[in-house]
Structure formats: C-alpha cells, structure tokens
C-alpha cells in the first residue's frame, strides 16, 4: 500500500449515514508555511493516477511544496460507504484530514481534474478564508443535464445482469466515445499512445483502464458525479450563485476546446460569477483527456498555468 489513511470516527454524510471513514492520502515534500497544495482524485481515479502532474521540474514541485493527493470516498483506497456520497461529504472529510492530521490553516492551492475540479470549487466556497488559489481543470462546479444523461447510460449498463468483466468492458467502450473528441478519432491520435488500431486502443487503453476498477465503486462515483453541485448542501441550500460568489481565491479555470462532459460554456458562466477569476482554453483535439496526462503538449500547457498562479 503506497499511501496512508486517516480515520474519521462517526463521520456523518449528507445522506444521514454515520460511518467510520478511512481517508486515503499520499504526501510529497515537506510541510512549512504557505506551501500546501491539495490535489483530490477524480472519477474512479487512484492516488497514483494523479502523479503525472508532480515533479521537481514541474509546478507541483515536491522540493518546494507540500502536496497532498487525497482519494475520494468510494474509490477503494478511501472507505466505501453504504449510501450516497456528495462533493460536500468528500471535501469536509478532506478538510478534517488536513486540519486534524497536519494542523494546516492555509492552503496555497487546490487543483484537480474532472471530479477533482468539482471538489476544487467545493473547497474554495466552503473554506474561502483558507484556500488562497484554485485551478480546476476539465470540470465544472455543477454537473449539467447533458452530462447527467451521459452518466445515466453508464449507470444503466452497470446495473445489467451479467459478469462484472463483461459489464465493465461495455462501460469502457461507451466511455471511450465521450472521453475524447470526434477529431481525436478521425486523426487516429491513438497512434501517438502506441496503439496500432482503433480496436487495439479500445481494448488496450479503455478496457484495461476500467477493468482495474470495482463495479460498485464505479456506480457509487456515478451518483456523486451526477449529483455534483457545490451549492447542494446545508451551507448554501442550492443557491448556486451564492456558492460561486463565496469563492475568494484567485481562480484560473482551465477548459479544453471540446470537452464532451464539461463544456467550456459552463466554465464561462462560472468565470462571470467568481470575482477574481480567469478562464483559459486548452486548444487541441484531446477533449476531456487533455487533463489526464496522456498528451505531453496539454500537460505542459496546464503546468505553465500552475507555475504562473503559484
């Protein structure tokens, strides 16, 4: 096990469930004043899946910053719940980790991809006096209806009666059509990743990736994603505008030119609501996975923005 856990006894979820939660995390670098970076995981992601953005030549430099990757609940590293888990639940648990375990009072930066971006927004509105900067990339503060519909199709696949392996393979092939753009497939960009054919890519990348995941965890995270809304909690009572305006952190939002999950138009709305914010578009054809560490050019693009804000 290449990570640690922090125990939250009697942690109450929004659903009312009270659980003994084990929050999984991994740290990089040494803690000192004003050098904390919080970096949550994403849909089905493991802690190790976030490491592509960390390195001594990169913005998230462990020789300079104390970086904490925190696993979402229901990812098999952090505890699994018996009920539904919200963004609010995840971020409150993460806040308890950083304050109880490390005594952290200020966070220099929160950043994350996809559902990690959703948690980034949640951090900033719940703890505006603690979070100094945020860079959410390839994600939004509220899941759109179209995004919900995409996830509904995946959810229904996983509820079918069949072996986990067959269901997850079907799930992966549907996911493949959304994670990357039409232009990516037209231009056969999978060849840049070392795959010889489209079928090779579907099996070697997508099926292999999701077969490492647990079907129940995938379903649990779908619910969290579908119901992603940083205002749907006792603090903001579904007042989305109030939640967005509560963000005090210096904010850079990064959006791909064509993200089929989280369209840049949603981020444009968010930019208008956050006072000290700027939206930057990632050019290219990699869609949502511009933020996944697959493409060197996109990684350099994101890293430069992180260096600038830090």
Image (spheres, grey):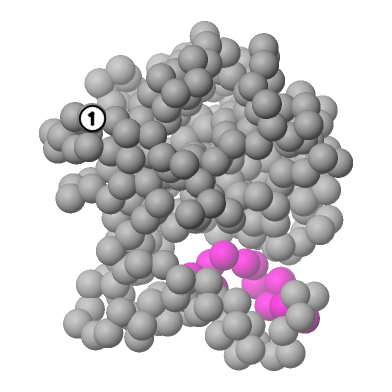
Q: Is 27 displayed left or right of 213 in the figure?
A: right
Q: Which residues are magenta?
A: 175-191
The reply to whether the magenta stretch includes residue 6 is no
Main SS, magenta residues: helix
Residue that lies at the very extreme toward the right in this rendered image = 57
The spot of residue 288 in percent (x, y) is 61, 57
Number of residues whose C-alpha sits closer than 10 Å to that of mark 1, classed few (under 14), some (14–19) or many (20 or more): few
- The residue nearer to you, when weighing 76 against 158, is 76
What percent of the width, then of the height, locates residue 209? 53, 72
* 178 part of magenta stretch: yes
What residue is shown at x 22% (from left), y 37% (from top)?
20
Residue 235 in the image: state x and y as whole percent: 30, 17
Q: Can residue 238 be seen in this snapshot?
A: yes
Q: Does the image show residue 245? A: no
* Residue 303 placement: quadrant: top right
Q: What residue lies at 82% left-to-right and 40% top-to-bottom?
A: 56
Q: Residue at x 40, y 51 (%)?
A: 77
Vertically, is 273 above or below 257?
Answer: above
Q: Considering only vertical position in the picture, is 231 above or below 78?
A: above
Drawn side of residue 108 relative to residue 21, left or right = right
**Near-viewer residue (206 or 258):** 206
SS under mark 1: strand
Q: Position of residue 231 (x, y in %)?
A: 35, 27
Q: Quadrant of the C terminus?
A: top right
Residue designated by label 1: 9
Q: Residue at x 50, y 21 (%)?
A: 102
């Amino acid at each position: 096990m290449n990570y640690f856990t922090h125990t939250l006894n009697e942690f109450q979820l929004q659903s009312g469930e009270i659980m003994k939660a084990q929050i999984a995390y991994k740290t990089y670098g040494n803690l000192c004043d004003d050098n904390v970076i919080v970096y949550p995981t994403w849909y089905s992601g493991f802690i190790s899946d976030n490491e592509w953005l960390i390195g001594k030549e990169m913005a998230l430099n462990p020789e300079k910053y104390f970086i904490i990757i925190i696993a979402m609940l229901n990812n098999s590293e952090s505890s699994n719940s018996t009920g539904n888990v919200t963004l609010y639940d995840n971020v409150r648990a993460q806040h308890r980790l950083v304050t109880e375990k490390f005594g952290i009072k200020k966070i220099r930066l929160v950043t994350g991809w996809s559902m990690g971006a959703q948690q980034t927004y949640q951090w900033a509105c719940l703890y505006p006096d603690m979070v100094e900067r945020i860079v959410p990339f390839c994600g939004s503060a509220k899941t759109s209806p179209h995004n919900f519909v995409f996830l509904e199709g995946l959810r229904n696949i996983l509820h079918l009666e069949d072996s986990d392996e067959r269901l997850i393979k079907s799930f992966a092939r549907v996911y493949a059509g959304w994670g990357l753009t039409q232009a990516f497939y037209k231009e056969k960009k999978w060849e840049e990743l070392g795959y010889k054919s489209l079928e090779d890519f579907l099996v070697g990348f997508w099926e292999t990736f999701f077969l490492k995941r647990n079907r129940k965890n995938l379903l649990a995270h779908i619910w969290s994603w579908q119901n992603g809304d940083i205002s749907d909690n006792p603090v903001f009572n579904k007042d989305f505008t109030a939640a967005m305006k509560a963000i005090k952190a210096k904010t850079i939002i990064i959006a791909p030119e064509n993200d089929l999950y989280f369209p840049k138009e949603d981020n444009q709305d968010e930019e208008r609501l956050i006072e000290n914010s700027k939206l930057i578009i990632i050019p290219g054809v990699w869609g949502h996975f511009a933020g996944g560490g697959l493409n060197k050019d996109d990684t350099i693009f994101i890293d430069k923005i992180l260096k600038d804000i830090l």
